[in-house]
Image (cartoon, rainbow, N blue to C red):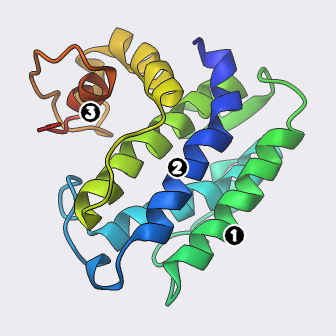
Amino acid sequence: MGMASNRSLLPVAAARFTAAVRAVPRDRWNDPTPCAEWSVRDVVNHMTGEHLWVPHLLGGQTLADVGDRYDGDNVGADPVAAWESAVTASLAAWQALPSDEEPVHLSFGLVPASLYASQMLVDLTVHCWDVARGAGLDERLVPEAVSAVLAFLEPQGSALAESGYFAAAVATSSADAQDRVLALSGRDPS
């Protein structure tokens, strides 16, 4: 699937991430994840912050307009409720967007919403696995989302690690799409 169709996969990937967040056992929120130095709670906090930004950015605001209001703790005492509130508003903003070509201000410039949707799909998919791995949950991801993320990430090759958003790719001989996505994003699928 191409980047323009990735927006349609956001609700499915978000539902899988939400299911993982809801399933985190009470005693596993502070457990480590494959994200260096991030606990399960930290990953959910990061994703909550990312989705709190969406209505602002899809509404035409810049990063400067939003400022630092989502820095720090976005989940408080109830990470599940905080996540659900953020993702509900995020998905509503995506659904209301008239076109995948709408301009969105990101840290690296003005881009079409389709690119932003692809980045959000990557985060939902890869960080879902991080939460599942850290909390000891089922690690299988949404196959359609995995395929779309693989199609988005594969052409970027070594630029992924150079961007600073991912660790260096992990070598894998696996033909499994999920394993390949994880390896490209610097995670050891085994």
Q: Position of residue 158 (x, y in %)?
A: 23, 18
Residue shown at 67%/19% (left/top)? 5
Question: Which of 57/124 is in front?
Answer: 124
Q: Residue at x 16, y 31 (%)?
A: 168
Q: Amino acid at mark 1?
A: Ser
Q: Earlier in the sequence, mark 2 or mark 1?
A: 2
**Residue of label 1:** 85
| 26 relative position to 50: left or right | left
Looking at the image, can residue 74 be seen? Answer: no
Q: Is residue 51 left or right of residue 147?
A: right
Looking at the picture, does residue 82 appear above or below residue 107?
Answer: below
Q: CA distance from mark 2 to mark 1?
A: 15 Å
Find disc 3 in the rendering and name its residue. Answer: 182
Q: Amino acid at mark 3?
A: Leu
Provide residue 47's location: percent of width, then percent of height: 49, 58
Residue behind mark 2? 16
Q: Would residue 136 be seen by someone viewing this image from the given angle?
A: yes
Quadrant in the rendering for residue 154? top left
Q: Residue at x 9, y 22 (%)?
A: 171
Label 3 close to label 1 by CB (< 8 Å):
no
At mark 3, the secondary structure is helix
At label 2, the amino acid type is: Arg
Give how far apart the Cα atoms at labels 3 and 1 are: 27 Å
State the SS at label 2: helix
Is 137 on the left or on the right of 53, as rendered? left
For the point 59% across and 48% down, the residue is: 14
Q: Quadrant of residue 26?
A: bottom left
Q: Mark 3 vs mark 1: which is more N-terminal?
A: 1
Find the distance from the CA under tag 2 to the CA under tag 3.
16 Å
29 up-or-down from 168: above or below = below
Above or below 137: residue 165: above
Furthest toward the front, the residue is 138
